[in-house]
């Protein structure tokens, strides 16, 4: 994409003051673009949790110009699987 980038703070979906993936990053992006985060810490599956009842994100492998889902996004049903109501 042509043109100069702008400064952005890259944040996660949780409303927490420390939820930054990057601060003041120069990016040449527009609305609808996807970002690849190579080192995502607790946003990757192995260190993630279901904090605030948020499903875990999918994992995508990029091989050249091909993308492959290697772990599907969790659903709300996945989050509630294994939970049981107390007997009346």
Image (spheres, rainbow, N blue to C red):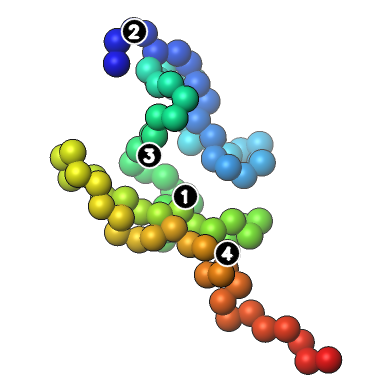
Per the model, the C-alpha gap separating discs 2 and 4 is 41 Å
Per the model, the C-alpha gap separating discs 1 and 4 is 17 Å
Front position among marks 2 and 4: 4
Q: Residue under circle 1? A: 43
Q: Which label number is shown at residue 3?
A: 2
The kind of secondary structure element at disc 4 is helix
User: What is the residue that sits farthest to the left in this orientation?
Assistant: 64
Question: Which residue corresponds to the image point at 40% horizontal and 21% vertical from the top-left?
Answer: 29
Per the model, the C-alpha gap separating discs 3 and 1 is 9 Å
Quarter of the figure with the N terminus: top left
Q: Position of residue 88 (x, y in %)?
A: 83, 91
Vertical comparison of 86 with 51: above or below = below
The kind of secondary structure element at disc 3 is loop
Vertical comparison of 23 with 17: above or below = above
Which one is nearer the viewer's eye here, 53 or 66? 66
Per the model, the C-alpha gap separating discs 1 and 2 is 30 Å
Q: Which label number is shown at residue 76?
A: 4
Q: Are marks 3 and 2 in contact (CB under 8 Å)?
A: no
Which one is nearer the viewer's eye here, 49 or 54? 54
Question: Which residue corresponds to the image point at 48% horizontal and 16% vertical from the top-left?
Answer: 7
Per the model, the C-alpha gap separating discs 4 and 3 is 24 Å
Q: Position of residue 12 (x, y in %)?
A: 54, 40
Question: Which residue corresponds to the image point at 44% horizontal and 58% vertical from the top-left?
Answer: 73
């Amino acid at each position: 994409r042509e043109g100069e980038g702008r400064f952005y703070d890259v944040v996660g979906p949780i409303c927490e003051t420390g939820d930054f993936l990057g601060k003041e990053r120069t990016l040449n992006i527009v609305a609808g673009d996807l970002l690849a985060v190579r080192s995502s810490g607790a946003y990757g599956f192995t260190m993630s949790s279901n904090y605030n009842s948020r499903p875990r994100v999918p994992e995508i492998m990029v091989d050249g110009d091909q993308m492959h889902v290697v772990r599907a996004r969790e659903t709300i049903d996945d989050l509630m699987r294994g939970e049981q109501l107390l007997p009346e």
